[in-house]
Image (cartoon, rainbow, N blue to C red):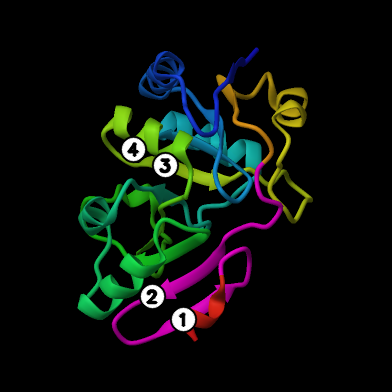
Amino acid sequence: MSQFFQIHPENPQARLIKQAVQVIRSGGVIAYPTDCGYSLGCQLGDKSALDRIRAIRRLDDKHNFTLVCSDLSEISTYARFDNHLYRLLKNNTPGPYTFIFPATSEVPRRLLHPKRKTIGIRVPDSRIVSALLAELGEPIMSVSLILPGENEPLTDPYDIRDSLEHALDLVIDGGFCGLLPTTVVAMDSEQIEVVRVGAGDPSVFE
């Protein structure tokens, strides 16, 4: 049965943040709040935890996982982009976007889209996420918490606990999140494409 932490969305309690990161480092899978619904997360490169997330979401190997990052310098470790794309990122992070980039060699191969060798990147506008990343010291490997057969992320931590308490190690209750998923933008030096319109304004990339 999963643990259940109530963490303040504006002033995250340091003690609970540390405990949550201990769960991640020990191979746990967590549900945590972002600015666009709740997400499932685990430690970067943890194959067992990754497989558990795939099972919960019923994902195949073609699904793009997302690295939830703290800032632009961290993004540059895992994604390849030029100065033009850097300026676009700087102007739109943190925020309700997922960016798909060509991946660097730092990204574990099992996370990549098998044909395109791309990786999703997120910098959520969330103090809880920022605190988790600062304590963890690396990105969180993540997917939106959209249950099989549904189209939108879960927004109520109590619903998450009721549905997944035996599949998760921790549910972080950070209150209700946004109702819309992120806007997804595929970015490379040749082309910028809005793949999915969600909470983020797509016009800045069109």
Q: Where is residue 121 shown, x and y percent of the image? A: 40, 57
Q: Is residue 178 magenta?
A: yes
Q: Where is residue 116 shown, x and y percent of the image? A: 39, 70
Q: Neighbour class for label 4 at 10 Å: few (<14), some, many (≥20)?
A: some
Horizontal side of 6 relative to 119 (left or right) equals right
In the rendered structure, are the residues bearing label 4 and label 2 in contact, judged by CB atoms less than 8 Å apart?
A: no
The residues bearing labels 3 and 2 have C-alpha atoms spaced at a distance of: 20 Å
Is label 3 in a helix, a strand or a loop? strand
Q: Which of marks 3 and 1 is nearer the N terminus?
A: 3
Horizontal side of 104 relative to 12 (left or right) equals left
In the rendered structure, are the residues bearing label 4 and label 3 in contact, judged by CB atoms less than 8 Å apart?
A: yes
Q: Name the residue under label 4.
A: 45
- In depth, the one of 118 and 68 nearer the eye is 68
Q: The disc labelled 4 sits on which kind of residue?
A: Gly
In the rendered structure, are the residues bearing label 3 and label 2 in contact, judged by CB atoms less than 8 Å apart?
A: no
Q: Name the residue under label 2.
A: 187
Q: Residue 141 carries which label?
A: 3
